[in-house]
Amino acid sequence: MHGKPRIYNESSMKHRKLGRTGFDVSEIGYGAWGISGAQWIGASENDSLRALHAAIEQGIDFIDTALAYGDGVSERLVGRVVRETGGRVRVATKVPPKNRLWPARPGIGIEDVFPYDYIMKSTEESLRNLNLECVDLQQLHVWNPDWVKGDEWRRAFEELKSSGKVRAVGISINDHQPNTALEIIETGLIDSVQVIYNVFDQTPETNLFPACIKHNIGVIARVPFDEGSLTGRINENTVFPEGDFRNGYFKGDRKKQVAERVGAIVSDLGLADVSELPGIAMRFCLSAPAVSTVIPGMRSISSVTGNVTASSKGPLPAESLAALRKHAWNRNFYA
């Protein structure tokens, strides 16, 4: 995979604007947490590189990574592939909280999580890992609305953009807390938000998405498959590798709960087989006009192809969306 940039075929992948950035991004992006080798167990570095290349070959041109993903491993792999493909991909990354607490905790000030110097230093580290001169989108990896009036993030974002080290800035919203971004959106000082959005968690539709449309804020929808629930491949007998974070996410009787919920979706939609569910889950996210791009994790070429195929089919019909509305599920498996 070294040498001259590979030449890729043109793709029919659809593109959308990432809010006021004006970036045209593939409506399916690449979520690069799973290729870090940390918490998601099972994919080798070669598998990850092949999946990244396959994604770009099939028209995906937006990759979301983070400094915390494997302590830079994900960024280094992403940077390598971006250089090998001639730099024709938009790259987003994130500044991890200095106190390493996910999600942000109430009562902890921004000076302990995102002080100005730390944001600047972390961005420089990400640029070194990526081996790029500029990152298209820098995000804060957690958010607390109490910080909105703070000076640290404002000064850092302004300087990073004016220096040309980043082109746009945004935040990654805490798990299942879309309303915590409403105030910062009103400031006009960010360009995008990243939020959990899927068939089970439809809460961004109520307040966040209308605010993003109003202020022309890009929306990056993460966890479209609810960490695997909405692939239809999890049941009571599913076993995850030791050290895989899903052992905690699906602890206790949660796998049974998921299988029952998924079975109800398959029945209500009249699907011939549960294998149709991932495409439905992806198209559900793409049916929201506010969404700029959806970023599933993809550690295999087959996953890449499946997600791209879902995009080619377009949004779901109104009757399918109506049926899925009643499958919203208010719970937090991250807790």
Image: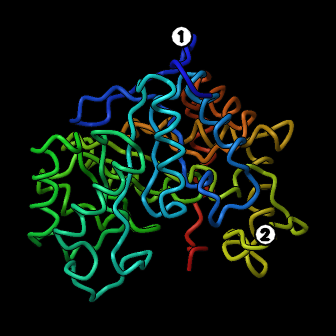
The residue drawn where x is 74% and y is 78% is 251
Percent coordinates x, y for residue 303 in the rendering: 71, 38
The residue drawn where x is 66% and y is 70% is 245
Inspect the image, locate mark 1, and give the three-letter code of the amino acid beneath it: Glu
Observer-nearest residue: 242 or 133?
Answer: 133
Please give the label number shown on residue 298: none
Percent coordinates x, y for residue 146 in the rendering: 20, 77
Vertical comparison of 245 with 286: above or below: below
Judging from the image, what secondary structure is the residue with disc 1 in? loop
Q: According to the image, label 1 marks what residue?
A: 10
Percent coordinates x, y for residue 294 in the rendering: 49, 41
The residue drawn where x is 52% and y is 18% is 4
Q: According to the image, label 2 marks what residue?
A: 255
Inspect the image, locate mark 2, and give the three-letter code of the amino acid beneath it: Lys
Q: Marks 2 and 1, how far apart in space?
A: 40 Å
Q: Quadrant of the C terminus?
A: bottom right
Observer-nearest residue: 99 or 103?
Answer: 99
